[in-house]
Image (tube, coloured by chain):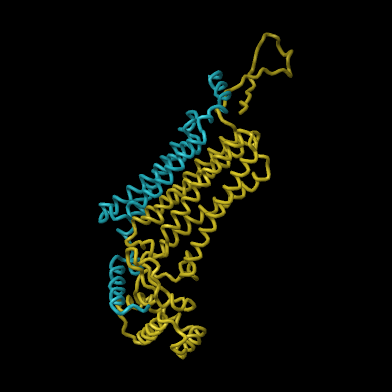
Chain colours: A cyan, B yellow
Amino acid sequence: MTDHTASHDHTADHDHAHGGIGKYIAVFAALCFLTTMSFLTYSAAWPWRDQPQVGWAFMMAVSCTKALLVVLFFMHVWWEANWKYVLTIPAAMMAVFLVLMLVPDVGMRNRMVSQERALHMARPTDVLLLQEASGAGHAEPAPH
Amino acid sequence: MSSPAIPVPHDHGHGDGHHGHIHLQYQPGLPLTRGKLIMWLFLSTEIMFFAALLGSYIVLRFGAAVWPKPHHVHLSEPIGAFNTFVLICSSVTIVLALEAAKANKTQLAKLGMIATFVLGALFLGVKGYEYQAKFSHGIFPWAPHGLIYERPDLYYGSAVRARLGEPAIIARLKELDEAPVSSLSAAQQSARGNLQGIRKMLTDPKQESFEMAVVADQIAPLPAEGPGGHGAAHGINDAFPWLRLPMVIPGGSMWASTYFLLTGFHAIHVVVGLIVFAVLLGCTLGPKNAGMIENAGLYWHFVDLVWIFMFPLLYLF
């Protein structure tokens, strides 16, 4: 055990030689490409325009890929020893767990609201109302 | 780096003869420097901090009955994408600065660090410009400045009436009514007509919700979806910015709270990063300080990482 880590200490400096500027530029190009990919859901070619959930899932997948590229290569995690799992995996699990814990109270808050809050909060019908009003407004000749 | 030494009791059969002499047995530490270990521990707490913010945003947003579209709240996707690009570039420059410092190319390392600092400052500048665009449209996260109402109802109507009844506003409205047509643009002329209609309607005690929707739409219309609707500003508030009449953005209050909280905390992290870079710029960026650059870089990549998730969640969803 002692010998093992001692040798690690020795090679710690050499480990980063795996980096290399070419690799960073490749990761950079991939990140730029993925950022433009997020806009794919806005293009006319995107077939699931009436199902926004598909677009959301796609954009989150793109984000996770970008995050993974940054963590693995820019933060050198790809070349680190096994301690990386101890620090990252529990924190990531807590992050997911935290969102799940918020769902019953916060995510589903609109299922049970007090009458007072229901009186003041926005409803989908308000948006329709405003769109109707703006439709009526646009029927008139444009002010410009 | 150096392993903690643990004193080990020993017994060589010499009795108490060796008081000051302790045999040390070295425990193996982690194969990384202490600074880097602390930075990673800090980052793991940061993961949970931003997970809490982003997680509550996701849950609030998808649990909301209504959520404003990006162009309803004057969010510009290209600006967000540009900022994403700026942060990605700054991540590359700091990684290149680290490589240069390790290779003892101090000038090149300094150049990379300066580039990172400039890109970080550019990100903040763009963010400030975006905030200014929100503030100028009356979108604030707090009550006294915020003009956002959730629904075009009677509460909204009374808020508009209260604003129109302020003495300063009454004086300026009088000026506006008497202003000659030639001094007004076409948009201002039609806005003046709409405004006079609204003032007449508000003196009528019998108001209905739908009429309030018309009022809301004439004051600050929600731009229609599609490329033509972007930035189309022809409401009363746009024609006469000094009026600052209350406006209806369904779901807008919660949007403003979450948007400013998330981007605000992210911006604070960017500011801290810039301070660290400024300190590093005062040092010789050679192999001796490579560890410091690496730790600053780890922090900066994390800030980039958070933005990678914030950009689609705030601008594209």
Please state, as top left, top right, bottom left or bottom right, where the C terminus of chain B lies in the image.
Answer: bottom left
Q: Is residue B24 left or right of residue B253?
A: right
Q: Percent x, y for residue A97?
A: 39, 43
The answer to whether residue B306 is left or right of residue B297 is left
Q: Is residue B312 above or below residue A8?
A: below
**Residue appearing at x 67%, y 17% in the figure:** B23
How many numbered markers are drawn? 0
- Is the N terminus of chain B in the top left, top right, bottom left or bottom right quadrant? top right
Q: Is residue A65 above or below residue A45?
A: above
Image-based side of B201 in relation to B138, left or right: left
Q: Nearer the viewer, residue A15 or B247?
A: A15
Residue B306 pos. (x, y %): 47, 48
Which image quadrant for residue B95? top right
Observer-nearest of B30 and B231: B231
Residue B246 at what x, y percent from top left? 42, 74
Which residue is situated farthest in the top direction here? B13
The image shows residue B213 at horizontal and vertical percentages of 32, 75
Q: Nearer the viewer, residue A126 or B128?
A: B128
Identified at 40% across, 72% down, the residue is B233
